[in-house]
Amino acid sequence: MSFKRTIAVTVNGKSYERLVEARMTLADFLRGELDLTGTHLGCEHGVCGACTILLDGEAVRSCLLLAVQADGAEIMTVEGLAQGTELHPLQKAFQDQHALQCGFCTPGFLMTAFAFLKETPKPTEAEAREAISGNLCRCTGYQPIVKAILQAAGKTTT
Amino acid sequence: MKPAPFAYYAPQEVDEALELLKQHGDEAKILAGGQSLMPLLSLRLARPGVLIDINRVANLAFVRRGANGGLAIGALTRQRALERSAEVASQSPLLSATIPLIAHFQIRNRGTIGGSLAHADPAAELPAVALVLGAELVLRSASGERVVHAKDFFLGYMTTAIEPNELLIEIRIPGLRQQAGWAIEEVARRRGDFAMVGVATAVELNGNNTCQDARIVLFGVGEKPERMERAEQLLRGQEATQTQPAEAAKAVSEDLDPVADVHASAEYRKEVGGVLTRRALEKAFRRAQKAIS
Ligand SMILES: Cc1cc2nc3c(=O)[nH]c(=O)nc-3n(C[C@H](O)[C@H](O)[C@H](O)COP(=O)(O)OP(=O)(O)OC[C@H]3O[C@@H](n4cnc5c(N)ncnc54)[C@H](O)[C@@H]3O)c2cc1C
Ligand code: FES
Ligand code: FES
């Protein structure tokens, strides 16, 4: 029956197997089926970046993927950043720089920045700005977010 | 904001995908990167009964040197792979320079060259560049294969020559000649947005600084990317002087009959289309002159 499929995925190092409807987005799967509600949904059509996750190491919008497409994939969500109670350096930098207010956009920014720094460990400020150009924040403003990314990259910020 | 139900297939071979297209034809939609189709499904602007996901099809994502120079690119090649490809940078610098203008890196990680061409958004960069470069598109169905030139591929607003039973397989991009110059310029509201107006150009000069060929394509101005033939004609056979780009730009501005929408008025697009054309031609001439000297 092609309206439903069983999929197996690894999320933050843990394996899951579920029967899902083909039309279910990966974002809804993570939130609704796996209860990983750290991945947020803003626009659900690819514009805001809140739902950004890592699929096999690459940052992607989870609202623009079907859960069935992730069968066999390795996924990392914002829940995978911290080690127990110890924040990831990026999270720590966001805290230090006040790079969040309501926090709605934060998971998307963190996962975007995580993927970006992996590929560009020592970015310029311009590169950091460009990297987050696909993520919308409606309350903090982007300045502290840029500073947080540069701090996490080991660049001194003022 | 949830897609309506559909029957889902994830073929692993091209032939299997073609067989599914033959069976389901009109009712089916191909899913490539999903960066245009998924929003349409979620907004229920598209409600296909059958979704054929080609992401697991073998041998559809590749970048190869073409038979006569240039490039052969698999339709499922991600935009991000093109951005990172040294082969693309050396064989088609215009294509390489175009990719970063498309959306954001998270979107380019999924979005494919074939999806962008098949989607044929009038403001998209890749259709315009395919037209400028004289790309050929390889379309295959269960009953055979045909090759369509970019100039015959884009038919109208988000409409292409792809038949319901056909799959775009490969994009062939001729190499630029040694003496060629190129440029792409656009104006968008924000970084990564679709262009309000854009222009892609490729020119060829000979050793006497005479323009042998010029191609100018405007995008974001109408139903589909448009070649500006009168402006091209003004350049051909003429010496590439400093005033040439401005004259061609004036012709572009006069000939444009752009759409107006919430992003920009028709007058604005006419004016900016000319300005961008001048800038693009200046850059393209400089690149060509550098290649010769
Ligand atoms: C926020 C955002 C910003 C964007 N900004 C830009 C931008 O600035 N410039 C730009 O050009 N694009 C932009 N895009 C669109 C993006 O480039 C898409 O990736 C692209 O338009 C479609 O490619 P896809 O592989 O994702 O195709 P899909 O979304 O999977 O498919 C698009 C259409 O093409 C058809 N199709 C796909 N592959 C084939 C094939 N091989 N054969 C036959 N039919 C096929 C599908 O059936 C569908 O109708 C943006 C998207 C988003 C979400
Ligand atoms: S919820 Fe996915 S991009 Fe907005
Ligand atoms: S912190 Fe509130 S939207 Fe970004």
Image (spheres, coloured by chain):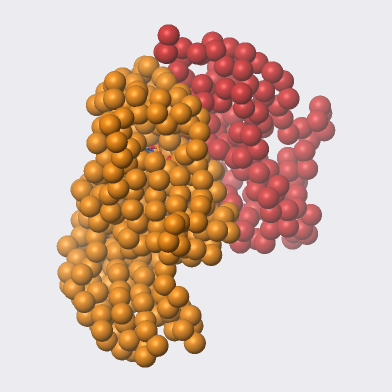
Is residue A33 left or right of B125 when viewed as pictured?
A: right
Given residues A19 and B76, the one toward you in this image is B76
State whether residue A136 appears in this view.
no
Q: Residue at x 39, y 61 (%)?
A: B174
Quadrant in which ligand 1 is drawn:
top left
The orange chain is: B
Q: Quadrant of the C terminus of chain A?
A: bottom right
Residue B18 in picture, x, y percent from top left: 35, 29
Colour in which the image shows chain A:
red
Residue at x 64% of width, y 29% of height? A75
Residue B5: quadrant of the picture? top left
Relative to B75, is B291 above or below?
below
* Residue visible at 37% across and 31% down in the picture: B30
Relative to B119, say whether A128 is above or below: below
Residue B74 position within the rendered picture, expressed as x and y whole percent measured from the top left: 45, 45
Image coords of residue B260 (percent x, y) = 21, 55
